[in-house]
Image (tube, grey):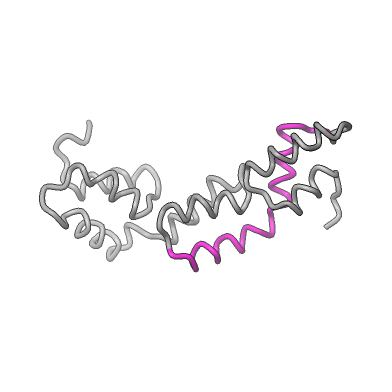
Amino acid sequence: MGFEKLSLKGRALKHLATREHSRRELERKLAPHEETPGQVQAVLDELESKGLLSQARFVESVLHRKSARFGTARIRQELQGHGLDAELISDALERSRSSEYERARAVWDRRFGEPATEPAERARQMRFLASRGFSAEVIRRVVRGSDDE
């Protein structure tokens, strides 16, 4: 069964049934099916008022899905791209910041597993962790092999 004959609300609910979506994502996905101007906004307003579309749940969902692989900076960038409330993003990321070293260490262990002996390899490991959005301080601690906080 596809989306062929579903109403906008039905389409939105089908998307939300698979995973949490941001309002911006749903706007983009529903816009091609809008028959009258403002129809998508009205549907999304209704879903928000009923608690079926929630910024807070979306933020938690992204944190849950991404935090094992990415650092705070990368997750912040993704969340900001969804047009979410800045305070909501900051609060959620503040909670995840406490586990950033452990998360970076796990990512590093899966990818490399042992400390670099050559400066070029150490730099490569650092670039890898930086591309995943981990902070410079955390990267230095992980690559140096320092478990002391």
Dominant secondary structure of the residues highlighted in magenta in the image: helix
Q: Position of residue 87 (x, y in %)?
A: 49, 68
What is the residue that sits farthest to the bottom in this orientation? 87
Q: Residue at x 21, y 46 (%)?
A: 10
Q: Residue at x 63, y 49 (%)?
A: 71
* Number of numbered discs on residues: 0
- Residue range of the region highlighted in magenta in the rendering: 85-114
User: Is 5 displayed left or right of 50 in the figure?
Assistant: left
Picture layout, residue 124 above or below residue 53: above
Residue at the extreme front of the image, as rendered: 120
Question: As drawn, which residue projects farthest toward the right?
Answer: 117
Q: Quadrant of residue 143?
A: top right
The residue nearer to you, when weighing 40 against 12, is 40
Q: Position of residue 13 (x, y in %)?
A: 27, 48
Q: Residue 107 sits in which quadrant?
A: top right
Residue 93 falls within the magenta-colored stretch: yes
From the viewer's perspective, tell me whether residue 19 is left or right of residue 142: left
Instruction: Inspect the magenta stretch and tell me whether residue 99 lies in it.
Output: yes
* Residue 55 versus residue 109 in the image, above or below: below
Quadrant containing the C terminus is bottom right
Classify residue 22 as left or right of residue 29. Answer: right
Name the residue: 28% across, 44% down. Answer: 29
Residue 30 placement (x, y as % from top left): 24, 46
Image location (x, y in percent) of residue 135: 69, 52
Relative to 118, is 90 on the left or the right?
Answer: left
Location of the N terminus by quadrant is top left
For image coordinates 22% across by 58% down, the residue present is 41
